[in-house]
């Protein structure tokens, strides 16, 4: 059962798995919720997609900061996992870089593979955006783009777009200054150049030279695109793990990003009860069973380091690391380094790409662990319950023309299906088609047993049906002395009924609270139909 309500509206990649937990499809989306929902709502799917949807058992996702990151990540994940239904992307090429060569008078150009000497910037998903950026940098700093310097100046020199070091009239120092400026811009420090171009644009606009102003505007957009440079693919020569965590309600929630040679290739998530020095224990246990990278990037609140010397000075801010019991930091560093075979670098970044990756990991924690909690809280609020209904049990009846009548009960705990507590019932006391009496029977059987076994009752009971089914369930609960809130959900208009009111609650069917109830009801319906079908197939065989 795909829980569409917990899927975020952020950009990112979605990962479909089958019943064997094998990855069968990886896609990217500007809006994950909209894209994933489309698979299950459209009726005119092509044959291949229909087959894909039929085999989807679960979905995972990795949220990115923007669609560009999603494109890069999709490419990386497809190449790593080679999913069955991504046949059109198996041979996809790597994205191109902007390249500044290592010559005495470096040239600037495009490079597909990171093999040449010099500096690389990117990769860039959009060729159009990349070419615009390249053009702006070349023209602004008048850098050469020819592969081999000619003996005389070319057209770019004559129109004022190149210094023409080929003439021999440009000192290396002057050309190097231009290269350094270009390097600064391509590394993301494009604000100064953008301001210069913006002033030019306004000047040409005032002179009513709108075509030139429009070109400058497009160049500014291209530079601003640099600020949108993706955080999931960076050109480094070692592997990193990015680890962030949140502490909430006495529990730890941890996200691990695995970054191979600068490219995010996957994530893992963990949760466990809070205890002191939890991060140290987690790292020891995690890297006892996983490959240890050259660098581990941690948030500011790290509890494992006692001396600043163990942190990277590359982009980390000077800070006081609180002392821990004994020589924990050194022993941990030694342990990780021994696992890796070389000294492992621990970095606590203050700014830059690594800080952005930590923020992205935290965002994924929020979505992975707390999006389900939010819909529980919203439902409690809309139903005006004293506490959010953490445990909800839902009943549904299924039959075929009055034969093989069965009932299902599904349980959702903290916003997610708890399949270990699903139950199914054969109706024993009802003849023919009588959904009302069938509901009364299974509700009575379920809660009589819980009372006898002294097991906890749910926080909310949901009945599939309208006022009739609800009234029968309420009568049974009253007889048993159970005061658990009970509601019903009528399928046609998704109306929510509560005892004592003739009209449904004013909750629209597209609100988060209603969508959560629909998700639970749909799961109960699926579970009941499956049981009914099994009984019918067994009867036919007999």
Image (cartoon, helix red, strand yellow):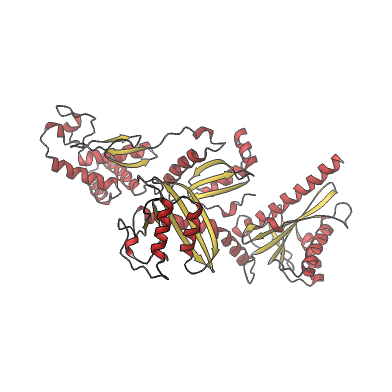
**Relative image position of residue 178 (x, y in whole percent):** 19, 43
Above/below status of 78 relative to 411: above
- Left or right: 278 as drawn, with respect to 204: right
Q: Quadrant of residue 514?
A: bottom right
**Relative image position of residue 156 (x, y in whole percent):** 20, 32
Q: Which of the two residues, 363 or 354, is positioned nearer the viewer here?
A: 354
Q: Which of the two residues, 159 or 420, is positioned nearer the viewer here?
A: 420
- Left or right: 273 as drawn, with respect to 336: right
**Relative image position of residue 524 (x, y in whole percent):** 72, 54
**Which residue occupies the extreme left position in the image?**
169
- Left or right: 149 as drawn, with respect to 49: left
Image point 72% across, 49% down: which residue?
526
Q: Quadrant of the C terminus?
A: top right
Inspect this view and state whether residue 349 appears.
Answer: yes
Badge count? 0
Inspect this view and state whether residue 364 appears.
Answer: no
Q: Which of the two residues, 154 or 301, is positioned nearer the viewer here?
A: 301
Q: Quadrant of residue 470?
A: bottom right
**Relative image position of residue 209 (x, y in whole percent):** 24, 40
Image point 83% across, 43% down: which residue?
538
Image point 21% across, 46% down: which residue?
180
């Amino acid at each position: 059962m795909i829980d569409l309500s917990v899927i975020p509206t952020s950009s990112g990649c979605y990962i479909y798995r089958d019943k064997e937990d094998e990855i069968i499809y990886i896609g990217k989306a500007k809006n994950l919720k909209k894209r994933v929902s489309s698979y299950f709502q459209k009726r005119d799917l092509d044959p291949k997609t229909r087959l894909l949807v039929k085999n989807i058992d679960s979905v995972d996702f990795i949220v990115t900061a923007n669609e560009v990151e999603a494109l890069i990540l999709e490419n990386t994940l497809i190449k790593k996992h080679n999913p069955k239904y991504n046949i059109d992307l198996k041979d996809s090429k790597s994205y191109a870089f902007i390249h500044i060569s290592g010559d005495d008078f470096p040239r600037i150009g495009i490079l597909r593979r990171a093999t040449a000497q010099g500096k690389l910037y990117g990769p860039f998903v959009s060729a159009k955006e990349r070419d615009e950026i390249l053009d702006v940098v070349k023209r602004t700093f008048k850098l050469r783009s020819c592969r081999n310097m000619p003996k005389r100046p070319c057209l770019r020199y004559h129109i004022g777009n190149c210094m023409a070091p080929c003439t021999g009239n440009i000192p290396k120092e002057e050309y190097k200054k231009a290269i350094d400026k270009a390097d600064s811009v391509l590394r993301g420090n494009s604000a100064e150049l953008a301001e210069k171009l913006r002033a030019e644009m306004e000047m040409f606009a005032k002179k009513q030279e709108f075509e030139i102003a429009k070109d400058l505007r497009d160049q500014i957009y291209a530079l601003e695109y640099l600020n949108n440079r993706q955080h999931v693919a960076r050109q480094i020569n070692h592997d990193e793990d990015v680890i962030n965590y949140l502490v909430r309600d006495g529990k730890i929630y941890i996200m691990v990003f695995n970054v191979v040679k600068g490219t995010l290739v996957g994530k893992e998530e963990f949760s466990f009860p809070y205890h002191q020095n939890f991060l140290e224990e987690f790292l020891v246990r995690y890297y006892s069973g996983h490959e240890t990278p050259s660098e581990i990037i941690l948030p500011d609140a790290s509890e494992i380091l006692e001396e600043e010397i163990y942190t990277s000075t590359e982009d980390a801010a000077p800070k006081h690391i609180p002392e821990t019991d004994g020589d924990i930091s050194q022993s941990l560093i030694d342990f990780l380094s021994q696992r890796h075979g070389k000294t492992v670098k621990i970095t606590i970044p203050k700014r830059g790409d690594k800080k952005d990756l930590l923020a992205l990991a935290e965002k994924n924690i929020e979505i992975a662990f707390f999006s389900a909690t939010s819909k529980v809280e919203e439902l409690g609020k809309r139903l005006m319950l004293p506490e959010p209904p953490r445990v909800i049990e839902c009943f549904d009846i299924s039959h075929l023309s009055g034969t093989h009548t069965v009932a299902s009960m599904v349980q959702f705990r903290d916003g997610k299906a708890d399949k270990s507590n699903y139950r199914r019932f054969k109706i024993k006391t009802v003849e023919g088609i009588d959904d009302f009496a069938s509901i009364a029977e299974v509700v009575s059987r379920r809660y009589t047993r819980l009372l006898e076994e002294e097991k906890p009752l749910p926080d909310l009971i949901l009945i599939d049906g309208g006022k009739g089914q609800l009234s029968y369930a309420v009568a049974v609960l009253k007889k048993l002395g159970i005061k658990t809130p009970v509601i019903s959900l009528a399928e046609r208009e998704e109306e929510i009924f509560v005892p004592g009111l003739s009209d449904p609650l004013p909750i629209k069917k597209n609100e988060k609270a209603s969508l959560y109830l629909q998700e639970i009801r749909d799961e109960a319906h699926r579970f009941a139909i499956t049981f009914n079908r099994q009984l019918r197939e067994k009867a036919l065989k007999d």
